[in-house]
Structures are given as C-alpha cells and as structure tokens.
Amino acid sequence: MLVIIKKYTTSFLLSIGLICLIISPTHSTDQIPELGDPYSQSLPLKQEDIIGISTYRRLQKYGYINNDPLIISYINYLGNSLSRSTMDITRKYQFFVVQSDQINAFAVPGGYIGLNIGLILLSENEAQLAGVVAHEIAHIKLRHSAEMIANASMSNIPMWVGIIAGIFAGNAQASMAALKAGIGLSAQRNVNLIRSNEIEADDYGVEIMYKSNYDLSEMASFFDKMENSTGEISRNLEYLSTHPMYENRIANIQNRSSVQIKPMKNSTDDYIYVKNILHVSLISDISKNIKLLTNSDKYSLHKLALLYYKRSDYKNAYDTILPIYKLNSNNLYISIAYANILIGLDRIDEALNVLNKVKNIYPLNSVISFAIAEILIENNLNLNYAERLLEPLKLHYNLNPNYLRISSKLYMLKNSDFKAAISRANYYQLLDDVNMSLEVLDNTIRSNTINIEQKRILEAKKLNIICSNPRPLEPIFGEKTCN
C-alpha cells in the first residue's frame, strides 16, 4: 500500500482516509439495511453514489470523458436498452465514453459505466459492444464492489487505495496509473473472488443480452478476439487484466446463443457513425488516414468529411459531405457534420436551416436541440428560442460540462446573473473544482444584481455543496453549518 500512496500530498492522503471511512465495512451508518441485500452494511447504495459521482467528476476534470452529445446519446441509448431488462429501480445508470485508445471498460459503484474508445473501435458490431456493456451492468447490479468490501482483508486494501487514488490523484496520468495498480494487485490476491464475480457477471450479462435480443455469439466472438489478440491490439489490451478469463468462458456464452431466434447484430446504423466520430477524435496523422479512405459509400465519405473538418479544411469537407447530405438529409449524423462544416465556412444561417429541417423530422431529439441552441448562443442570436431549446434538456445533460457552459453563457448574454451563477457553479462542481464553484456563488451573493429570494437560494446551494462534498471544506473554527 505504501508503494502506491507515498507519492501523494497530505491533503490527498486525508481524502483517501475520508473515503476509506465511507467504504469501510465497519463504518456505522444511519441508513436502514435493505431487505434481501447482504451488502447493504458494507457499501450502502447512498455511498455507492458518492464513489460514482466522485469518480465521474475526476474523469471530467482531466478531460477523459467524450462529451459529444451524439456520442452520449448513442452510448446511453445502448446502455439503457440493456439495463432496462434488469428492472433496477435503485440506481440511475450513466454510460460514458473515455478518450483512450486502450482496450478496456469499467464499472464504478453507483451505476457509472465507462467504455474506452479503443474497445469500441475494436468491436465489429453493436452486439459485440453490447456484450461488454451487459457484463459491466451485471457487475453493478450484482454489487460486486460491495462484495469486495464485505470480504475485505489486508489483501483488498490495494484495490481501494488504487480506486481512491484514481479519484483524487493530483494529475491525470497518476490517476489512471493508480487505478490500474490497485485493481491489478487486488486481482492477484483475490483470484477466487474475481473468478466467481466474472462467472456471475457473464451469466447475468448473457441474460441481459438474451432479453434485449442481441446476438450472444457476437459476445463470445468479441471475448475470443480479445483473448487471442496479438500485435498492436495486444499491446493496448487492458480489459483482460481487470476482467481475467476463466476456463470455458467463451464456450459457455457460445452455447447459450444456440437458443436465440433471429438475434440482432446492429439495432441501427448509428453504431457505424459513432465509430467514425470516435476514430477521428483519436487520429493525429490526418493526411495519412485521408489517403487510406478510398471507398465512396456514405459511411466512408462521412468519415472523410470529419477528417477534413478536423484539419480545418472546410472546402474539401464541404465537397465531400454535400453529395451524401443531398441523399440523406434526414440523417442525424450527416446533417450535424454538414452543419458544423457550414459554420466553419461562416454560413451560419444555412447551418441553422439544415438543423431546423432535421428538428422538424425529429422534434424531440435532444441532440438536435442542443446543436441549434449552441449555434444561437455562440453567435448571440435569438436567445429566447435558445433558452426554450435548452430548458427541457436540463435533466438529460446535467452531467455534461458543455451544456452547463453553454447555459451559463446564455444567461450572461441575457443579463440573468442568478441563472448564470447556478449554471457556472454546477459547471465547476462537475469538473471537481469545488472552490471555484463556491467562489462563483459567493461573488453573486455579494452582488446587488439579484433579489433577496435569489440570494437565499444561492446560499442554500452553497451550503449543500459544502456539506455534500467528501472533503473537509468547513473551517476548523467558527459556527458549524452541516449536520
């Protein structure tokens, strides 16, 4: 344990101590044990949420999470379509994509499931990706993190120190390295429990896949591909280090697929467009990849246009995407790419027309509403309409910093200091910058631009942030404000 934590500061060690206290199996709590849950004392669901949101905020802080609304929408569509079959009403699952070419996925207590871009790109169809997501959902639903704590001994400590280091470490590299180190040490010393959990997660994951009618043979095929990988794939493959294979694992999944009737590999072609967007986001040698794209189908041309756009070559991007847009003007991915290219060419009115046309087809689509609102706000156009578009998205995008940033800018342009302060405070809190969040609230409370009721609301929000934060924010001396 000392090897892992000795690099970190006193404040970091204090944070570890506090969270260790939270997850300690001997930690007393006023929460009533949940009937039928053998792990309600070792890790209550309320504490799962704290660990989950803390991890998510730390990943946001260092820019690990892809916040593209198209990506968020798709990955949550896939995840929710799978988690729905679990009938799990105790937690709200959050699915997100991690900006990493490493091949891995992970589940964090509280229902937070992360998928690395590298893993998504390695998959060949949606069913393969769904197999991994179903497996991670199973880990959360079966409360394997709580089981680890309930079976805690000195050998489990490295895992939790690693996880907590991943939450509170002072830089991005240390954060991920400590997380891997902790999980790795735990896996070596808890082989039987890890193996048991993997078998359970596979069995439950298979049930989820079966109920969702995804092709189980593709799940088996993907695990086989990872197990027998070589070369560059093998070098980037971290999944097996945190999800060790056991004997007959692939065969067991394959056997279950024989009873399926017309299972699906892809529910829509969204999967292909999402892979295009994610692949381009990781590419550094744009010219090389442009030369490699020789096909003229709509998927290849969509990817080619994205590459030109990333290089700020808006003319070639426009010439590439226009033909497929004319044939697919109702396609969400092509239309948004086309609109972004038009904005690059300073043709803002045309971009808005493109998006409004798609909105007429899909009036309830949150991605289109967000895209239109963002253009309007960034160009200080029709702010009342932009506000009407953003307001219904509040719950859908409350964990997206881009939404909070755009909302804050909207209200600043409209001279609504109260609403701007709330959005900015939420933005900094999501990026794990609690001090900045409190500073925003303090400055607005002290200003003369808000009324008494609004000050009361902001003061209550400030108190809530102080009291809900796992780190000690209150002064040692002075009046105690939290129960």
Image (cartoon, rainbow, N blue to C red):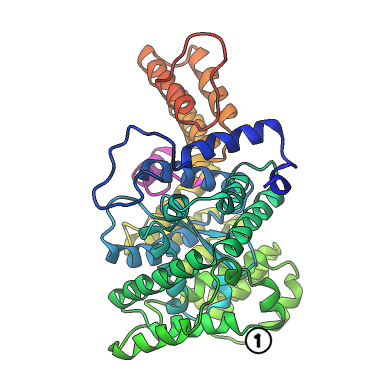
**What span is in magenta?**
381-400
Residue 61, located in which quarter of the rendered image? top right
Residue at numbered disc 1: 294
* Mark 1 residue type: Thr
Residue shown at the point (44%, 84%) measured from the top left? 218
Residue 81 inside the magenta-drawn segment:
no
Q: Is residue 367 visible?
A: yes
Count of numbered tags: 1
Toward the left, the furthest residue is 35
Position in image of residue 451 (x %, y %) = 39, 14
Is 415 positioned to the left or the right of 89 in the image? right
Residue shown at the point (75%, 74%) measured from the top left? 287
Toward the front, the furthest residue is 153
Q: Quadrant of the C terminus?
A: top left
Residue 265, located in which quarter of the rendered image? bottom left
- Relative vertical location of residue 201 with respect to residue 323 in this rendering, above or below: above
Position in image of residue 458 (x %, y %) = 43, 21
Residue 58, located in which quarter of the rendered image? top right
Nearest the viewer among 80 and 231 is 231
Nearest the viewer among 114 and 245 is 245
Residue shown at the point (48%, 64%) measured from the top left? 193
Q: Is residue 380 visible?
A: no
Residue 390 inside the magenta-drawn segment:
yes
Q: Residues within 10 Å of mark 1 (few under 14, many from 20)?
A: few
- Relative vertical location of residue 363 with respect to residue 425 in this rendering, above or below: below
Q: Secondary structure at mark 1?
A: loop
Position in image of residue 361 (x %, y %) = 33, 64
Nearest the viewer among 244 and 110 is 244
Toward the top, the furthest residue is 478
Position in image of residue 208 (x %, y %) = 33, 71
